[in-house]
Image: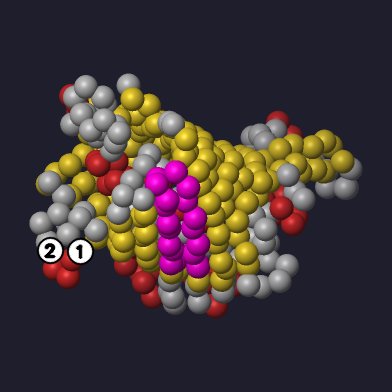
Amino acid sequence: MKFYLKVALIAIFITSTFMLPNNAMAQAGGSAVPFLLISPDARASGMGETGTAIADDINAIYWNPGGLAFLDYFPAVGNREENPYTQVALSFSPWLPQFNADLYYSYATVGRYFEDLDGTVAFNFIFMNLGEFTRTAENGQVLGKFISNEFSVGLSYGTIVAPDLGVGFQLRYIQSNLTPTSAQTGGEAGVGISASFDLGVLWKPSDIDFLGIKDKLSLGLNLQNVGPKVTYIRESDPLPTTLRIGTAMNVYKDEFNDLKFAIDFSKLLVKRDENGSDALPLSLVSAWQNPGAEWAFGVEYWYERVLALRAGYFTEPAALGNRQYWNFGAGVRYDIFSLDFSFINTIEENHPLANTMRFSLLIDFDS
């Protein structure tokens, strides 16, 4: 008796439905472990999945590790030598609720500014539960059940290299457990292991006073999930290497109000055809032959830095899956706690992402 290969493929299909739909897999080139592309925080999700140029809290570890460079002091105090900045972020989301498949996504990260390192160091953990599956023999006999999951562990660092320029990177261990190891299968199993790195840059121009953009504009770039392929049994799939470029602007800010707009562009740098997939670094170039890219637009309004309202729009061309949806969110801040909520309103009826909600908690510490 043996595990059917289709068990692993079903698990891959389930995770791919929310990030890389079927036609995208065929036309744009699929990837393994797409859970790495899920935005972890409800704040950025509520803004249409934008965050590359904002990256002003510890969730920068996902959106742009270059943003970690600017988290060097506790904002309410402003003295990094006496009050180094420490922040914890937690997030949870029941995933694809329409499927009732017990899928969920959870995320945790903690970071702190270290004067000796002249930068912020952050630790990150992501866990994706893929649900329960049934193991069968070749004759169809049920042999038991098992739970599939995927997770990653990351370590990041960001530092200032110029008064208005921050750079950062993340190193990540990735493990995908689609089917368990079994003596009956000769040790073969749908378990894949890989490692990757991210490299981010965030520029917040402070000396440019053109058209009033001084201290209002930010530009970010993040190349993420760069690493070797993940191998399941005899099938190898590339990581979801992605290039993100974003810009954000504080269009209005006074004592009580803070209004910000953001735009993100993202391109999956995975090239696959009938001959297989291109390996790094060739895929970083050849993937630009794939049609289209993803665009996200978001707006955030804060009142007295206590109550936030957010909205955004995400779109991609038909060649990539034709996902289009509105995002809405809200946030409230009390003392050292910030609680955020987001909701996806899909344009297409009965879309797998419809009614997906995310909750995230941010905790600031004056350590």
Do tag 2 and tag 1 residues touch (Cβ < 8 Å)?
yes
- Say which of 57 and 61 sits in front: 57
For image coordinates 37% across by 59% down, the residue present is 259
Is residue 355 at least partly visible in the picture?
yes
Q: Is residue 235 left or right of residue 124?
A: right
Where residue 186 appears, as percent x and y from the top left, is 67, 36
Instruction: Using the rendered view, name the quadrant where residue 173 is placed.
Output: top left
For image coordinates 32% across by 21% down, the residue present is 367
Decide: is 15 above or below 173.
below
Decide: is 172 above or below 82.
below
* Residue that badge 2 annotates: 209
Check disc 1 and give the amino acid type.
Ile
- The magenta segment: 296-314
Where residue 155 appears, as percent x and y from the top left, is 36, 34
For the N terminus, the quadrant is top right
Identify the image's colour scheme: rainbow, by chain, secondary structure or one colour.
secondary structure
For image coordinates 52% across by 40% down, the residue present is 339
Q: CA distance from mark 2 to mark 1?
A: 6 Å
Q: Which mark is residue 63?
A: none
Where residue 54 appears, as percent x and y from the top left, is 34, 53
Which residue ends up furthest to the front in the rendered image?
A: 255
Q: Is residue 354 left or right of residue 362?
A: right
Q: Is residue 172 left or right of residue 273?
A: left
- Say which of 104 and 87 sits in front: 87
Question: Main SS type for the magenta part?
Answer: strand
* Residue that badge 1 annotates: 213
Where residue 246 appears, as percent x and y from the top left, is 33, 62
